[in-house]
Amino acid sequence: DPRVTYWEPTKWVASLRHNKTDDNTLLLKIDMGSGHSGSSGRFKRLTDVALEYAFLLFCFDQPSSQHDV
């Protein structure tokens, strides 16, 4: 949405990161070509899903800091 500048959500996420009390990762993904409803286009939604799957695979492939590996 061109009415929402990119620094508004980044400031909000920075505040969340500063005030959170756990060690969980807090991520922010910005797509300057999408609106409030997400991506549009025939294959853009598939690209977004592929990015989510790739991130999950990356996370599960990493050794956990809470377990002995």
Image (cartoon, helix red, strand yellow):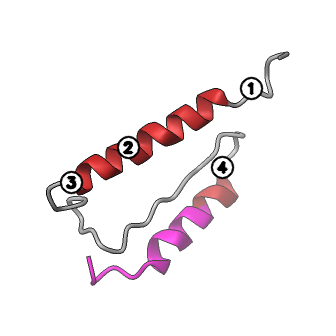
Q: Nearer the viewer, residue 13 or 47?
A: 47
Which stretch did the figure color magenta? Answer: 1-15
Amino acid type, label 2: Ala
Mark carried by residue 50: 2
- Sequence-wise, which precedes: disc 2 or disc 3? 3
Question: What distance separates the C-alpha of mark 2 from that of mark 4?
Answer: 29 Å
Does the CB distance between marks 2 and 4 fall below 8 Å? Answer: no
Q: Nearer the viewer, residue 68 or 19?
A: 68
User: Magenta segment: does it hold 12?
Assistant: yes
- Is 69 placed left or right of 57 in the picture? right
Look at discs 1 and 3 and give the one toward the viewer.
3
- Is 14 placed left or right of 66 in the picture? left
- The C terminus, quarter of image: top right
Q: Which residue is mark 3?
A: 43
Amino acid type, label 3: Phe
- Sequence-wise, which precedes: disc 1 or disc 4? 4
Q: Dot 4 lies on which element?
A: loop
Q: Position of residue 24 (x, y in %)?
A: 65, 40
Question: What distance separates the C-alpha of mark 1 from that of mark 3?
Answer: 34 Å
Q: Nearer the viewer, residue 62 or 10?
A: 62
